[in-house]
Image: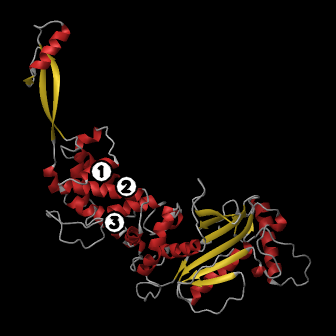
Amino acid sequence: MGVDATGPEQDDLRTPAEELVREIASSFSVYLGRGIQLDSILENVDPTLNIENLDELLDIHFLLSGEKLSAQAEQRPPQLEVDVPVTLDYGVMDFISLLRRRLRRIHTTTKHETQQFEGELRGRINWQETIKARYREGDPDSLTFACELTEETVTTPENLVLWELLTTVRDAHSRASDLVDQDEATWFDLWTNDSMLQNHLEAGLTDVYLSPLKDADVTVSDRMIRAVSESRSPLYREAAELLNWYRRLKRHDIDDSEAKSLLGRQLFYPDPKREDYDEVPTLFELYWVFRLLEAYDNPKLQLITGPTDLVAAWRESGAQYELYHDWTGGDLLTFKPPVFDREDLGESKDEDRYLRRLDHLLNKQTKSTDAVFGHRRPTNPDELRPDFVLLRRDIDTDEIERIAIGEVKYTRLQSTAADGLEELLEYMIYARNEKSRPGSRYFTTGPDHFETPSVHGFLCIDRVPHSVVEEPSVEILEYDDEVSRPF
């Protein structure tokens, strides 16, 4: 993936991230519902994040919802100025901001219980049960007493839901803290450095009434949450609604509006003050992955297990399709230059030509390092990773019949687009099947390798002036262009 060499001192003329969010939000929601795997794309969302999957990103989205209020605040302002859950008018941060004051309104209930005692009285005597107990013992004159005890308890549905929310926030914060570079990710500052939010959360978790619930062996069901969401108490009602929202997120029940809220987070937008300002291409990659998927009727994830680079797989017209992102080829393909798979140049009278010299050099390097140091030159040069690869397999033989390779450049510069075209052509001509016999493993064939129908290339750019590409198997796509099926 490539981006412009723009920076804080230059105008960034590329398609704004806000527009990309509007374009991809609906597809994001639809394809999640179909089981499309976006983890390999989302793990590159921000250089300050070490996330590996969508669920980790949703934890952060949950924690950043709402607005941090002052420690003295007793209620929210009429309207919060930052993102809140789509179906609510508040979020986690303002809920936690108000928590310490609200803890004074914890509801308890009185538990009534009848217990038997020998020779002692505790509480009011229940004479009816006392007489029954003595007759069961066969001694009407015994000193057995049945006493009615009352005990204040916090084990109510309301408090169980509140405790479940607080522990959910605690666990999400713990996971997020391990993922975030807290020296660089300024958008997470509100939750770091012994912040008021952490202090208020800790106050809830150590509250004298609530903390005994950590030993309660009770499962908070969705039904219980729905019941508590009808509570007249804002503390309990909001706790239930936030917990219900979190569970929906974790089920990937994300509609268009929720997708816009998630993708609109600051962590999706590069900070112009950062040196790696140009290294956050996630939205643009998502845009082109969705465009390619939209060219097919009903792509969805059909494999129960698969490599983490696999985005989607589906069957259509007697063929199996597989879409990979940021993929080296695994044990199926490779896109590396075949340094140690060179054809014999044969006898040549022109020893000064570049290819002859290069061939001689590579042979000499291999032989010399082995003979002198007993060390052979590595046979695996650096891995090359196209931004996306689409395979078509024969269902009966499982053979890879055709491939489409995509190189994405988030750019309006001709120089960056030209780099992308060079990379794409290199991927295409070196692409080969690792499991095929040596004579037939390349997908392109001469004399004109880029007229071979078994490999297709997409260069996906923002908007860059360019001439018509001459190679029939290479297609240049600009932002807003429709993507046609490569096969």
Return the residue at label 1: 225
Residue type at mark 1 is Ile
Residue 469 visible in the picture: yes
Eye-nearest disc, 2 or 3: 2
Q: Secondary structure at mark 1?
A: helix
Residue type at mark 2 is Arg
* Image: 57 above or below 411: above
Residue type at mark 3 is Phe
Sequence-first disc among 3 and 1: 3
Say if mark 1 contacts mark 2, CB within 8 Å: yes
> In x, y percent, where is residue 246?
35, 57
Q: Horizontally, is 9 left or right of 397 in the view?
A: left
Residue under the image location 23 percent in, 58 percent down: 96
The circle on residue 188 is: 3
Residue under the image location 46 percent in, 84 percent down: 15
Q: Horizontally, is 241 left or right of 365 in the view?
A: left
The circle on residue 247 is: 2
Q: CA distance from mark 3 to mark 1?
A: 29 Å
Q: Horizontally, is 16 left or right of 463 in the view?
A: left
Q: Secondary structure at mark 2?
A: helix
Eye-nearest disc, 3 or 1: 1
Quadrant in which residue 307 is drawn: bottom right
Q: Quadrant of the C terminus?
A: bottom right
